[in-house]
Image: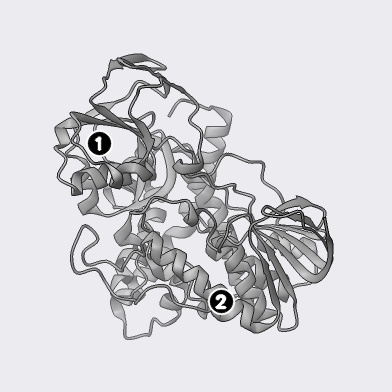
């Protein structure tokens, strides 16, 4: 056994999207900083190394990756269910992208050392997975935890229910390897992974009547058209922000708020007859929703507790199954609930979201703040946590936290300038480029300003009411 002594300024634990985005911005904003990255995977990309082969981003490629390098071609899709909207990078594209960032930017800089296939054990120490080598790192500045969210994917997830030995059961990674026709398919899970599994089955000509979708909780979703980066989508993206504030300002109560949010297109749902209980910030196109609505056999009996040879047992009942049914596991919770921590805490940085469901932008922003501000209290004020949502009513708290951050950022000229020039942001530049002759855009921005204050006041009112009188919304 050999113990290697190393030294660096920043030790980043995790070379997934979050760790890579932080390192990339730190390279730019701190020209002298030395960075050491340790990760248990064999190449950068984190959970993308374990993802199913047909996975794609669910938001435009323009908002993903690292700030210094474009992901994708910047074109719109001309065919398929994302037609007319900006491209969504595939899993292999994302994996290749991060590998290129490491090999073409990080390592050639001479300031980054990379240690894949290593397990971090804490206190600046890590061990090789493949040998007896151990490493001890003298960290001059900060240890950066880029693994806080512990992202889980089906292939690495152990189901929380029992499965009989002879049941045809596998994560959705196995779908492209099926070599026979099954009488039916059961998709277990209600999140974005389950949506991908159902979409894959439909795209591959599986009769929707043969699909049973076990949906523990229906979800509110974002319409992807409202998250587009191009100026031609100004009224959709920026207009959507104004619509949300107007819905808040005019809503009579919480029920009325969600009615208005759906009516203005801010959120949508697959089954309009069911009130969603979940909100994870997943993004989808209208054409995809129309396809998913072809599946009529939705099972809403709670979570699965066991899959036996002849039946599936759920919290609130059971349904039949058999040897000619293929069961698709999509039950992994992508990000398990965790305690919120300060981003900056002494010699540790814990990367968390500071904008609604935007972990990559958030990591890049944290790196910029680390390089640009000295006072820890001020850093944490600037990097207020926008918690990842779970329940439908979490829309309120993530919206409030997001608005608070945007207000704080608007008061810092240096932050405003960074946002305008950051490709992972997208919308600040769009607003800054509005000119006096862009009459319709000016009207949209004015409408947002007019409804923002009463909208935020109503938002705080609803949050207080919900805290004082929690209910099963």
Residue located 67% across and 41% down the image:
339
Q: In screen coordinates, is 214 left or right of 105?
A: left
- Point 25% across, 46% down: residue: 199
- Residue bearing the label numbered 1: 271
Residue 103 - label: 2
| Residue situated in front as seen by the camera: 155 or 463 | 155
The relative height of residue 472 versus residue 149 in the rendered view (above or below) is above
Residue nearest the observer in this picture, 13 or 75: 13
* Residue 211: assigned label: none
Q: Quadrant of the C terminus?
A: top left
- In percent of width and height, residue 34 lies at 75, 76
Q: Helix, strand, or loop for circle 1? A: loop
Mark 2 or mark 1, earlier in chain: 2
Q: Secondary structure at mark 2?
A: helix
Report the quarter where the N terminus lies: bottom right
Dot 2 crowding, Cα within 10 Å, few <14, some 14–19, many 20+: few
Examine the rendered structure and indicate whether residue 197 appears above or below residue 323.
below
With respect to residue 255, does 374 lie above or below? below
Q: Whole-percent x and y of residue 177?
A: 30, 45
Which quadrant of the view contains residue 238?
A: bottom left
- The residue lying toward the viewer, choosing from 171 and 330, is 171
Residue 253 visible to an observer of this rendering: no
Query: Which residue shows up at 20% across the image and 40% down it?
Result: 293
Towards the viewer: 443 or 414: 414
Q: Position of residue 445 (x, y in %)?
A: 39, 70
- The residue drawn where x is 29% and y is 47% is 176
Image quadrant where residue 331 sits: top left
Estimate the x, y position of residue 208 in percent, counting from the top left. Answer: 16, 36
Establish if 188 lies above or below 335: above
Residues at discs 2 and 1 in contact (Cβ within 8 Å): no
Residue count near mark 1 (Cα–Cα under 10 Å), binned few <14, some 14–19, many ≥20: some
């Amino acid at each position: 056994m050999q113990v290697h002594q190393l030294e660096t300024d920043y030790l980043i634990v995790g070379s997934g999207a979050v760790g890579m985005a932080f390192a990339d911005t730190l390279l730019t904003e701190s020209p002298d900083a030395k960075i050491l990255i340790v990760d248990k995977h064999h190449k950068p990309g984190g959970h993308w190394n374990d993802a199913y082969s047909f996975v794609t981003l669910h938001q435009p490629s323009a908002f993903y990756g690292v700030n210094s390098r474009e992901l994708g071609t910047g074109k719109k899709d001309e065919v398929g269910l994302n037609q007319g909207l900006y491209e969504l990078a595939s899993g292999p594209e994302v994996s290749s992208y991060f590998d290129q960032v490491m090999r073409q930017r990080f390592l050639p800089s001479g300031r980054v050392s990379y240690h894949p296939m290593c397990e971090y054990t804490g206190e600046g120490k890590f061990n090789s997975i493949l040998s007896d080598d151990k490493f001890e790192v003298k960290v001059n500045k900060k240890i950066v935890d880029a693994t806080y969210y512990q992202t889980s994917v089906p292939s690495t997830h152990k189901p929380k229910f029992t499965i009989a030995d002879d049941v045809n059961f596998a994560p959705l990674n196995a779908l492209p390897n099926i070599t026979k026709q099954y009488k039916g398919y059961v998709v277990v899970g209600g999140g974005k992974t389950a949506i991908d599994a159902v979409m894959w089955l439909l795209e591959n000509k599986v009769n929707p009547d043969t699909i049973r979708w076990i949906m523990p909780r229906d979800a509110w979703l974002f319409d992807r058209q409202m998250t587009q980066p191009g100026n031609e989508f100004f009224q959709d993206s920026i207009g959507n922000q104004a619509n949300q504030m107007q819905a808040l300002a005019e809503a009579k109560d919480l029920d009325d708020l969600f009615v208005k949010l759906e009516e203005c297109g801010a959120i949508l749902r697959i089954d309009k007859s069911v009130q969603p209980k979940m909100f994870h910030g997943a993004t989808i196109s209208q054409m995809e929703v129309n396809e998913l609505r072809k599946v009529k056999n939705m099972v809403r009996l709670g979570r699965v507790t066991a899959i036996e040879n002849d039946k599936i047992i759920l919290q609130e009942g059971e349904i039949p199954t058999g040897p000619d049914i293929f069961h698709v596991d999509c039950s992994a919770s992508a990000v398990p609930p965790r305690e919120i921590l300060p981003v900056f805490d002494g010699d540790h940085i814990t990367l968390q979201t500071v904008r609604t469901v935007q972990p990559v932008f958030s990591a890049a922003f944290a790196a910029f703040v680390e390089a640009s501000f000295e006072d820890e209290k001020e850093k944490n004020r600037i990097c207020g946590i926008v918690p990842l949502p779970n329940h439908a009513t979490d829309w309120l708290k993530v919206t409030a936290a997001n608005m608070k951050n945007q207000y704080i950022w608007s008061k810092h000229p240096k932050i405003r300038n960074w946002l305008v020039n950051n490709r992972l942001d997208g919308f600040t530049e769009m607003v800054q480029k509005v000119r006096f002759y862009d009459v319709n855009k000016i009207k949209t921005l004015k409408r947002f300003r007019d409804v923002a204050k009463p909208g935020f006041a109503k938002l705080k009112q609803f949050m207080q009411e919900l805290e004082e009188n929690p209910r099963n919304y």
